[in-house]
Image: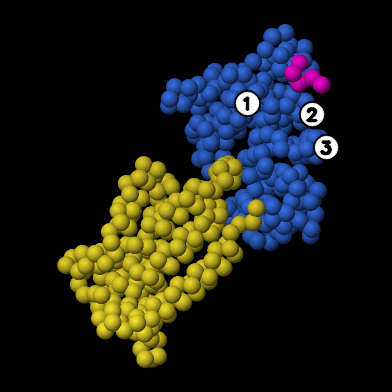
Chain colours: A blue, B yellow
Amino acid sequence: MAAFVELAEVSVRLEDGRTILADLSLAVAEGETLALIGRSGSGKTTALRLVNALVLPTAGTVRVAGRTTREWDPIRLRRQTGYVIQEGGLFPHLTVADNVGIVPLLEGWTAARIRARVTELLALVGLPAEEFAMRRPHELSGGQRQRVGVARALAADPPLLLLDEPFGALDPITRRELQREFRALTRRLGKTAVFVTHDLTEAARVADRMALLDGGRLLAAGTAAELVAHRDPVVRAFVEAAAP
Amino acid sequence: MTGEILARLGEHVVLVGMSMALAAAVAIPLGIVLTRRPAWRRPVLGAASVVQTVPSLALFGLLIPLPAVGGIGTRTALVALTLYSILPVLRNTVAGIEGVDAAVREAGRGMGMTDAQLLRRVELPLAASVILAGVRTATVIDIGLATIAAAIGAGGLGVFIFRGLAMLDNATILAGALPAAVLALVADGALGLLERRLRPAR
């Protein structure tokens, strides 16, 4: 399978000289979900933001669908990439329907087509439109907000999804539920996804493979089983900390 | 007397309405620019603050000899009132846009909004109530200040106040002061209502 997202020897350094990422190389195959795991400050969010050109590398290249993020028009790239952040980042002044329909609106879809798409997506994430379409984000529970966030990211049917700790603020039961649904959804729709989490168990549930970052460097990459069997002491420490 | 009060009240409302419209037309776009160019913020807000420190009666007087904006009459009064009204609106525009939740801004940028789309669809709607609060503050101050416009022949309710002062006649002073106070209260209440309607629910 061809790599849909590819980071080749990517470094990100700030103007003050701090290094956020150093020589990071990663590939995500088409249809695959890769989890980026690591502690706070390990650089995983920056690695994610490289993919939709919210951050540009200071060295190395990031390719999405064959083109580097410097070649892509950033607006076009982001319109074709679903982005979900913690708490969803929903627009508080818009209804659920308007939140979900915003990218199609920016893309110039007709009102009727947007309405049909919103209804379809809300059903897909388990929030029937007749009940939820006209609500505002503050009238939803945390789990419902994240469902709307996922629906919004899927609105223009992007091939790629980027998720930054999307379920981080949820209670364990809702979190489990959303992990299962997310996994089923990406498989069914054939989406490529990069999922940032600090939780190894979550990574194992939602992703095909995972990459462990520490201090801006890639420490290990592989399936959950491969990571658990890893010998490196830092990897072991991370795995053991996650074990119940 | 009632007829003249109404006429002067009309002049007063026009002075306040026009100067506020001008101030908003300058301060809101300028405030938006300042959120995009943080380096300009200090000098521009500083300049707007300096204008505010000039005693109002002196500002009206100082403008009179200036070409184009000066002279005796409504035009000079409008310039002075506009200058005074800029700062509260400018400050609140900057604060309102800066106050938009970083996660919401990140989501907008991440979904491929251009800067103009982010501004129009996200930042301005979310900042609207804060910006309007600045307009409200400026309007209430403006209604009081506009009474001074009478000193340079621009009319308004200040005409009664200056006449009453000259004649040592409290009733005449009140004929200007009371309608001005009521006008300020009404404007404050109406804009406050609008402000609450624009405030996004959390």
Q: Is residue A129 inside the magenta stretch?
A: no
| Chain where mark 2 sits | A
Q: Estimate how packed mark 1 is, as few (under 14), some (14 to 19) or many (20 or more) residues with alpha carbons within 10 Å.
A: few
Depth order, front residue of B202/B185: B185
The answer to whether residue B119 of the structure is visible from this angle is no
Depth order, front residue of A157/B29: B29
- Horizontal side of A82 relative to A181 (left or right) equals left
Q: Estimate how packed mark 3 is, as few (under 14), some (14 to 19) or many (20 or more) residues with alpha carbons within 10 Å.
A: few
- Residue A27: x, y in percent? 64, 24
Label 3 secondary element? helix
Cα–Cα span, label 2 and label 1: 20 Å
Cα–Cα span, label 1 and label 3: 23 Å
Q: Estimate how packed mark 2 is, as few (under 14), some (14 to 19) or many (20 or more) residues with alpha carbons within 10 Å.
A: some
Q: Residue at x 38, y 57 (%)?
A: B87
- Residue highlighted by disc 2: A205
Q: Earlier in the sequence, mark 2 or mark 1?
A: 1
Label 2 secondary element? helix
Depth order, front residue of B97/B164: B164
**Numbered disc in front, either 2 or 1:** 1
Instruction: Please state the extent of the stretch shown in magenta in the rendering.
Output: A240-244
Q: Is residue A242 inside the magenta stretch?
A: yes
- Residue highlighted by disc 3: A173
- Residue highlighted by disc 1: A40
Q: Earlier in the sequence, mark 1 or mark 3?
A: 1
**Figure check: B51 above or below A88:** below
Q: Residue at x 49, y 60 (%)?
A: B133
The answer to whether residue A131 of the structure is visible from this angle is yes
Cα–Cα span, label 2 and label 3: 14 Å
**Numbered disc in front, either 2 or 3:** 3
Q: Earlier in the sequence, mark 2 or mark 3?
A: 3
Rendering quarter of residue B82: bottom left
- Residue A146: x, y in percent? 72, 43
